[in-house]
Image (cartoon, helix red, strand yellow):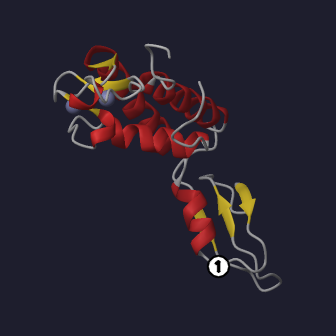
Amino acid sequence: MSDTPREDPAGTMRRAAQRMRRRAEAVQHYATPWRTIGPGDDSDRWSVAYTTDHPAAGLLALTPDYGTWNLPDYIASWHPLVALAVASLLEDRAKMADDQLSPDTPEGPCCEPPTACRGHDPEWGCNRCAVYLSSGSCRCGFTEALAVARAYLGEPEDHHG
Ligand SMILES: [Zn+2]
Ligand SMILES: [Zn+2]
């Protein structure tokens, strides 16, 4: 058994932030706000467009014809400035995690002979709250930031490094 938990929370947050930032910067030249445009006479499709002076320009995405305003509204709302702001939040939280989180292997009465358990997996603990992250009792936002990062990366909680 290793002394280090599989996942490094700060690392997961940074990977998500980097991917988010890279994707956002690649489309940042499409000026915000992004808007939705309803179907015209000849189509059932909604579109997402960036801000431009040219009335016929700015198309970013066209929804399928079974779509409604929900989809383009959603796409338009995740514009680059939002993604960059969320990436910054994740980076800030990762920096805090560098200082506040450390790996530790839980021990308890269950570990004592004669009925000693087989030991516990190492976990990340928050030094400020004096709890393991897995307890759900840390109030520093690491759990929430990790949830954002994992969801964005599409990686489940027990992802192997
Ligand atoms: Zn034990
Ligand atoms: Zn905490």
Q: Which residue is mark 1?
A: 68
**Res 85 quadrant in image:** top left
Q: Residue furthest right?
A: 42
At 42% from the left and 23% from the top, the residue drawn is 10
At 50% from the left and 17% from the top, the residue drawn is 1
Task: Mark yes or no: residue 142 visible.
Answer: yes
Q: Measured along the vertical axis of the image, is residue 114 above or below residue 36?
A: above
Residue 39 vs residue 9: left or right?
A: right
Q: Judge: label 1 CB < 8 Å from ligand 2.
A: no
Q: Nearer the viewer, residue 108 or 60?
A: 108
Task: Mark yes or no: residue 81 visible.
Answer: no
**Res 159 quadrant in image:** top right
Q: Measured along the vertical axis of the image, is residue 23 above or below residue 104?
A: below
Q: Nearer the viewer, residue 22 or 81?
A: 22
Crowd rating for badge 1 (residues with CA inside 10 Å; few <14, some 14–19, many 20+) = some
- x and y, in percent, of residue 6 in the image: 51, 24
Residue 77 vs residue 68: left or right?
A: left
- x and y, in percent, of residue 2 in the image: 49, 14
Mark 1 element type: loop
- x and y, in percent, of residue 111 in the image: 29, 25
